[in-house]
Image (cartoon, helix red, strand yellow):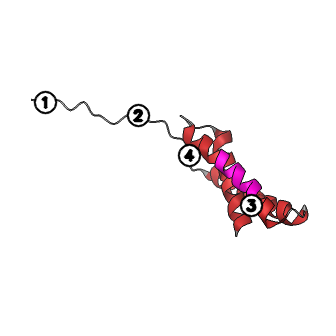
């Protein structure tokens, strides 16, 4: 009889548990993303192209850091969420 030694590896989750606190923070972060996109593009008079470049750069850095992370790091996770909502708001 042949044994199967290909048991699944135990990977640590890189996302937080979805709780009420998660949704409160997510709503706050979405609001922050909209405010940040508007502040850079309109209030600071930097324009659409500069605002998009700034938020896209932060987005790429955050996503690369999140992908490279071996475990859950709250700062990197929430930076990625803020960057995602900011670039989404700025582009739209």
Report which residue position mark 3 lands on.
52
Q: Residue 51 carries which label?
A: none
How far separated are the C-alphas under marks 2 and 3?
A: 39 Å
Say the numbered circle drawn on residue 10: 2
Rendered image quadrant of residue 16:
top right
Proximity of marks 1 and 2: CB atoms separated by less than 8 Å: no
Residue behind mark 4 = 17
First-in-chain label (4 vs 2): 2
In this rendering, the label closer to the viewer, 3 or 1: 3
Q: Which of marks 4 and 1 is nearer the N terminus?
A: 1
Q: Earlier in the sequence, mark 1 or mark 2?
A: 1
As drawn, the label of residue 2 is 1
The earlier-in-sequence mark between 4 and 3 is 4
Q: Earlier in the sequence, mark 2 or mark 3?
A: 2
Q: Residue at horizontal 76%, vertical 54%?
A: 54
Q: Is the magenta stretch mostly helix, strand or loop?
A: helix
Distance between the alpha carbons at the discs numbered 4 and 2: 17 Å
Q: Is residue 55 visible?
A: yes
Instruction: Name the residue at 74% across, 57% down.
Output: 53
In front of the other: 14 or 43: 43
Q: Distance between the residues labelled 1 and 2?
A: 23 Å
Give the mark toward the camera: 1 or 2: 1
């Amino acid at each position: 009889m042949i044994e199967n030694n290909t048991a699944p590896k135990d990977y640590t989750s890189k996302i937080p548990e979805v709780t009420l606190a998660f949704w409160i923070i997510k709503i706050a972060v979405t609001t922050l993303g909209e405010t940040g996109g508007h502040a850079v593009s309109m209030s600071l008079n930097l324009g659409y192209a500069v605002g998009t470049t700034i938020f896209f750069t932060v987005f790429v850095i955050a996503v690369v850091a999140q992908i490279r992370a071996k475990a859950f790091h709250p700062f990197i996770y929430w930076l990625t969420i803020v960057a995602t909502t900011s670039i989404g708001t700025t582009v739209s």
